Amino acid sequence: MTRPRPPARAYDAPMGEPRTNEYGQPIGRAVAWAPREPVAPVTLVGRSSRVEPVAAHHLPQLYDALVVRSPPSTWTYLAVGPFDAPAGLNAWLRDLHDDPGAVPHAICTPDGRGVGVASYLRLDHVNGSVEVGGIALSAELQRTTAATEAMYLMMRHVFDDLGYRRYEWKCDALNEPSRRAAGRLGFTFEGTFRNALVYKGRNRDTEWYSVTDDEWPAVRDAFEAWLDPANFDDDGRQRTALRR
């Protein structure tokens, strides 16, 4: 179901009073803003994961993790795959690397072994917006602390290091695991773009989610509380679920 569009509201910071122009028309809040640095490949290190620019040495590791040791259903909601040879996966990663609108990264174990992929997409440093997408998590990585930490590291880099205003997540409206992940990771649902794409010979209605810079401090606090070692018992099970 498409989310109803909320009524337009314009607020001025910091008092929250409605803003109007000299013609009496509502206008958006004032923003002190200058374009930021473009998103570029970066290495981000956490306790249980590393995020690294995809490199040649990752390719056999990613094929082993994402294809050999993961089910074909891993690729159902991606525009590519499943693959039956390394050449297909390598071509996808090469295309991402060569695309000026994508910055692909390998999600790695602490020792640097590639077990997943996630990319920065829809790069807009002028307005301070970027999407995380093209996410492929191996069976080894799914539903792990490392997977959550990798998403946190990528989001933190965008807001805290680059100073962006908006971080996006999009998925097939039928991809229930991705929809649940977006909510768990602190994204706010914005609506459904109907008939947005055609891939693998089928329609895709795309759900849009985002975190804004105003929301980020609370999202960051929730991530850091959840990732705190004290939140896990001796068997590595979480004591408290991730929530804002």
Image (cartoon, helix red, strand yellow):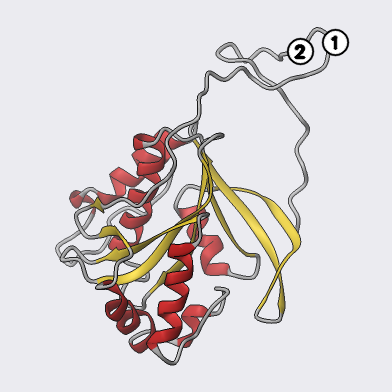
10 Å crowding of disc 1: few (<14), some (14-19), many (20+): few
In front: 79, or 223? Answer: 79
Mark 2, residue position: 20
- Residue at 44% x, 92% y is 84
- Residue at 28% x, 81% y is 60
Q: Position of residue 121 (x, y in %)?
A: 51, 54
Residue occupying the far right of the picture: 23
Q: Quadrant of residue 28?
A: top right
Residues marked 2 and 1 touching at CB (< 8 Å):
yes
Mark 1, residue position: 23
Q: Quadrant of residue 175?
A: bottom right
Q: Position of residue 123 (x, y in %)?
A: 52, 47
As helix, strand or loop, the secondary structure at mark 2 comes to loop
On screen, residue 242 above or below 37: below
Q: Amino acid at mark 1?
A: Tyr
Q: Position of residue 166 (x, y in %)?
A: 52, 39
10 Å crowding of disc 2: few (<14), some (14-19), many (20+): some
In front: 162, or 147? Answer: 162
Q: Amino acid at mark 2?
A: Thr
Mark in front: 2 vs 1: 1
Q: CA distance from mark 2 to mark 1?
A: 7 Å
